[in-house]
Image (spheres, helix red, strand yellow):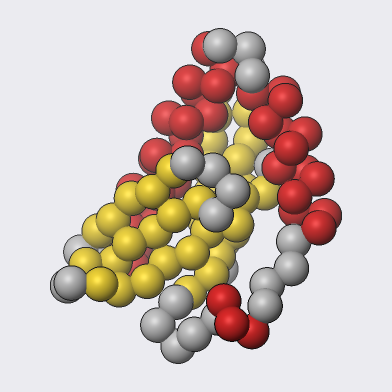
């Protein structure tokens, strides 16, 4: 599963959010914000898995990834975009931040 993530500095910390999920995190550095967001995405997917909704969410994210378009207005010098790749194997969730 591919998840679009955005990061931006504000009030001395880096904030991060998964654009298409109700998941957000922050850290003192961009690296810490990325790590914290990856962990938050894992927790989100594990909760979905527990209630039997992970397959539905994976399908929704695949459709969104296919249609993903960013406008110039969404991009700025103070906002970074990246991608988190989530994999589920043997009922375990792993997330890697890319870009």
Drawn side of residue 53 relative to residue 46, left or right: right
Residue 57: give x, y in percent of width and height.
67, 31
- The quadrant of the picture occupied by the N terminus is top right
Q: In the figure, residue 7 lies in which quadrant?
A: bottom left
Residue 91 visible, this orientation: no
Q: Is residue 4 above or below residue 24?
A: below
Residue 87 visible, this orientation: yes
Residue 14: give x, y in percent of width and height.
29, 66
Q: State the residue in front, 82 or 91.
A: 82
Residue 98: give x, y in percent of width and height.
56, 61
Q: Residue furthest front?
A: 73
Q: Is residue 47 above or below residue 75?
A: above
Q: Residue furthest left?
A: 12
Residue at position x 75%, y 50% from top? 64
Residue at position x 49%, y 64% from top? 6
Q: Is residue 26 above or below residue 79?
A: above
């Amino acid at each position: 599963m591919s998840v679009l993530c955005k990061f931006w500095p504000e009030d001395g910390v880096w904030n991060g959010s998964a654009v298409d999920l109700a998941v957000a995190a922050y850290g003192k550095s961009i690296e810490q914000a990325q790590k914290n967001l990856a962990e938050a995405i894992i927790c989100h997917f594990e909760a979905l898995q527990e209630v039997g909704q992970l397959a539905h969410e994976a399908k929704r994210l695949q459709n969104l990834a296919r249609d993903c378009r960013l406008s110039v207005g969404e991009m700025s010098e103070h906002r970074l975009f990246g991608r988190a790749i989530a994999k589920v194997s043997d009922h375990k969730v792993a997330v890697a931040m890319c870009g």
